[in-house]
Amino acid sequence: MNDWEEYLKSFDGEPGYLDWAAFGPLSPNVRAEVHADAELLGSGRRSSIELVGEHVRESRELLAQLLRTDAEHVVLQPSTTYGLMQAMYGLAGGLMVSRGEFPSLTVAATRASDALGSIDVQWIEPEGGFVTPDAVREALTDDTRALAVSLVDFRTGYRADLTALREVIGDRLLIVDAIQGFGVVDADWAAADVVCGNGYKWLRAGRGTGFAWFGDRALERISPVLSGFAGTEGDLPLDAVPQPAAGAAAFQVAGVDALAFARLATSLREILDVGVPAIESELVARSGDVMYFADRYEIPVVTPREPERRAGIVSLAPAPQDAAPLAASLANHGLTVTTRSGLVRVAPHVGTGADTLRLFGDALAAFSSARVW
């Protein structure tokens, strides 16, 4: 059995799960790593504790491989939001953000502006919520210093074009919330200045596995305002308060959970073994399968049709009177999705099998047969 077959086999959950954009059930290897490391941490032996602690270094190095950078530019975080707050609280000037972004971006931007007064949040409301290069170009001002955007929009599944956004904003900072695409989308990370993510969705590593990458331009322009004792050079700073560390290490508050990053390291190795391009290709095909059934039963889709503009999220937009019946039919057929603000978000992964897609088709067929036109 080759690496790809092993990877697909690792999706061992029950049929019907189509909510990977909300939470990724842990992979078998991650679960095994948790049990093994928990036993080591229960031994009380320093060597065992240090062995588990090695996963912290390993996670940074594996993240650097996926980001095509070096580990010195990567810092581990408790979540995506922590990384975004580290970036935004250190900014000055105009920060462009779509009002439709996930609250990790909108709340962090607002809190940073209110607390420090050095940020002017420049809200945009692009058509359909798609942060396109044209929408950004029209909204840019001389005061704009940074753009914050999701790689994959949590509502619609729209995948931002980082390369084109870089061309539009020029020398301004590009801050990317990558949680809905990291590890499953082969993005142009070099176009960004800050990339933040977490392993608890598509990476199947559980919560507490966040990270942030700060490029050279970001390190020059973003102050480590929220830097804690772990963000200093050398050993534990006692009897003095040193300056923040040089580089990405400054953007951390306290020590990290080695057990969490043992999970992350395990999941990253799985991804590197098969390659992100292969995962992306298969995931786009699975989202296409979801679209096929939606079209067959005449349920509107707001997610872009172009393969390069989507990843694993497909958002259905039933008529208002159809939203509840559709959600009920999906639940009655044993399917797990997210229903919010009138949209039904369906999120398969590469391991979503024919049995789950069959259930999805049956649920849409049952809904369609009972629909009143």
Image: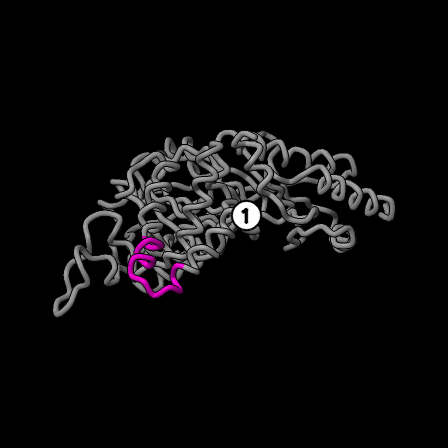
Left or right of 91 in this view: 187: right
Quadrant including the C terminus: top right
Q: How many marks?
A: 1
Residue 206 pos. (x, y %):
49, 54
Is residue 46 in the magenta section? yes
Considering every residue shown, the one lying at the far left of the view is 239
The three-letter code of the residue at mark 1 reads Pro
Looking at the picture, how far across and down is residue 140, in whole percent? 38, 41
Taking the image as drawn, is residue 320 in sight?
yes
* Quadrant of residue 359 within the rendered picture: top right
Dot 1: what SS?
helix
Q: Residue at x 54, y 29 (%)?
A: 2
Residue shown at 81% from the left, 47% from the top:
367
Give the magenta part as a residue range. 40-53
Q: Horizontal and vertical percent for residue 365?
A: 82, 42
Secondary structure mainly formed by the magenta segment: helix
Q: Nearer the viewer, residue 59 or 190?
A: 59
Residue 120 in sight:
no
